[in-house]
Image: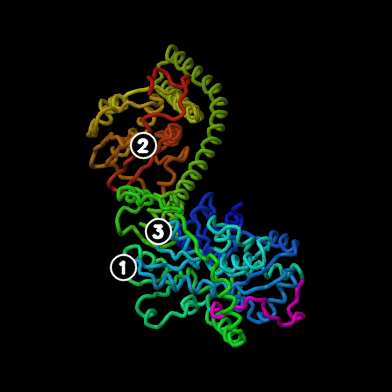
Amino acid sequence: MNHAIVSTISDRCKRCYSCIRECPAIAIRVIDAQAKVIEERCIACGHCVKVCSQDAKQIFSEIDTVNELIQTGKAIAIIAPSFAASFPNDYHKIPAALRKLGFTQAIETAFGADLIANDYMDVIKAENGKTIISSACPAVVSFIQKYYTELVPNLAQVVSPMIALGRYLRENIGEDVKIVFIGPCVAKKHEAQDNEVSGVIDAVLTFTELKKMFDEKLIEFDKINNSDFDPPHAFMGKAYPLAGGLIKTIDVSGDILEKDIIVVEGKKKVIEIIEEIANNNINAKFTDILFCEGCISGPAIDSNLNYYSRREKVINYISEKISQTDKQVWKSNLYNARKLNLLRNFTIDNQRRPYPTEEKIKEILAQTKKLSLKDELNCGACGYPTCREYAVAIAKDLAEKEMCLPYLLDELKIAYDNLSDTEEQLKVAEKLASIGQLAAGVAHEINNPLGTILLYASMLKKDLEKIYNDDQRTEDLELIVEEANRCKNIVANLLNFARQGKLNLKEFDLTETIREVLKPFTVNPVYRQIDFKFEIVEDNYDMVGDEDQLKQVFINIIKNACDAINESSKKELNVYLSINHNNVKVEIADTGNGIVKENQGKVFTPFFTTKSMGKGTGLGLAISYGIIKMHKGNITFVSEIGKGTTFKVVLPKYQAHQTNDAIEGTKAL
């Protein structure tokens, strides 16, 4: 059963995108805020494991499987020649330590490299007219199978050293032997599952897993003696983990090396050379390619040494052991294995996704607010080198918009601004609600005695007019009645103010409504010097709302504007009506003296007024604000001292969540 070789530990992933930035196969996508490996696209190179600072990428562990194999008493460990870099101080004791774990034998995989040397020599010498790519690195093989399928025929049809030694051991020891490969490579786990070579290797351990097993079994290296590996012993195959090690093993002549062979290591260079071969820009006969900078830099090398120290350890080990190798026995082992099948085929596993059209790329860039080349920051925060490559990944369903940091910051700013606005509106709404409750109670308590005052003042006035002809007393009573009526109006406003959330919705023509509101002002002698102008842009101002309450809003604003204009030398009032998408906008501009800056924050506050005593209650704009907010609209103003004030009312043409009971006389929308 195949397993996902590399996966994400969800609770550790911090969405830093380092793994996306490093993945050569674009096999990682952020899903539910987690950078998850797309199993079918993964080439198991292990680069994401190396760069993850949070240890959020895990490699499929085969420790339990290996322990079961050891229990059979037939388990053989074959270890990659880079072990000297992973165990720099104890590499002489590794064979004995492996036997102490329970392996019956410990053999160097390097002999498998010696086995395939002649097959590679045949490949290099063959005149087939194409550049052959080495097949020893399983990550390179998988990368080509998935993303450069046209180069699958270019892969050298030779097994890797691991498979070569596995076949050798099964041929010479028996098919029932249990073979465990140990090395620094994550992709070897994937190779062992490959249908073309499956069944040769029973399990794959990384050096990290091996060290964990040593710890679990309490194996102490200071109590273990130095030991040599079991035969067959390797020769130059020990150089395989170094860049160009395969060429050294084959012992190719200098002329061929200079003209026809290219050695490449490291992710960036590997991708470049594969692209060059795909584009027919390379004339070399053979390329030796390793995805890592040599196997000594494998993702599971598990060593604190730097590259050069690791390289030195492996070279020292090679120099030490080469001189001790019995070349006659080594040659005899190779000769006896001359009929062993060390060839294989490679299948295509195409994971390429169609490249998006230019229109689609531009559309995605626009969605992340990149409307021109100037907007493409290419900051790399998303894990992709350019904004364009990021857009392509989104089009291929390999990325998502929220990975773009500048876009996300812009969205967060908008959300924060909206939240601040909502918070401010909530504060105002709470204030208005509490004042509304107070207003309703006060209005109720005042109405009864106020009615009594009006009744008896009127009766007294009539009686006095019959008995006396005293103008002064009559005027005094008229003043009482007038003031009582003013109080009545204040109470009425208080009750209107308390009507929060109650709208009698119907469809009406806003143009006609404003004309009706303006008419009394234009004929009022008090305002005869004011030049009223009503400008309409476009047609069709049908909308749904509470017409009566909206009339009250416009009356309040226009009344305030007219009062302000009366104190100004220039007397002009403009009403401007326009449509913006699904909203209507009403602008009422006056040429009054304007609102002083210190009062602008109090304009919508209940009972605030700058008018003289008896001229205003300070509730008009507060009520207007509440009515507009109930309509899910917005009311703002701009004012300049000496030039005037403009109020802007924006209303949705149609109210959301309307019910049949709330709408009277409206037609279906």
- Neighbor class of circle 2 (other Cα within 10 Å; few <14, some 14-19, many 20+) is many
Residue behind mark 2: 650
Picture coordinates of residue 122, whole percent (x, y) = 43, 71
Which mark sits nearer the N-terminus, 1 or 3? 3
Determine the residue located farthest toward the top in the rendered image. Answer: 466
Residue type at mark 1 is: Asn
Asked if residue 443 shows in the view, the reply is yes
Which mark sits nearer the N-terminus, 2 or 3? 3
Residue behind mark 1: 281
Which mark sits nearer the N-terminus, 2 or 1? 1
* Residue 1 is covered by the magenta coloring: no
The magenta segment: 218-238
Asked if residue 304 shows in the view, the reply is no
How far apart marks 2 and 1 lie (CA) works out to: 64 Å
Picture coordinates of residue 514, whole percent (x, y) = 30, 28
Secondary structure under the numbered disc 1 in the rendered image: loop
Depth check: give the residue in front, 613 or 341.
341
Colouring of the image: rainbow
Give the dominant element type of the magenta stretch: helix, strand or loop. loop
Figure quadrant of residue 539: top left
How far apart marks 2 and 3 lie (CA) works out to: 57 Å
Identity of the residue drawn at 48% across and 54% down: 41
Query: Which tag is nearer the camera, tag 2 or tag 1?
Result: 1
Residue behind mark 3: 148
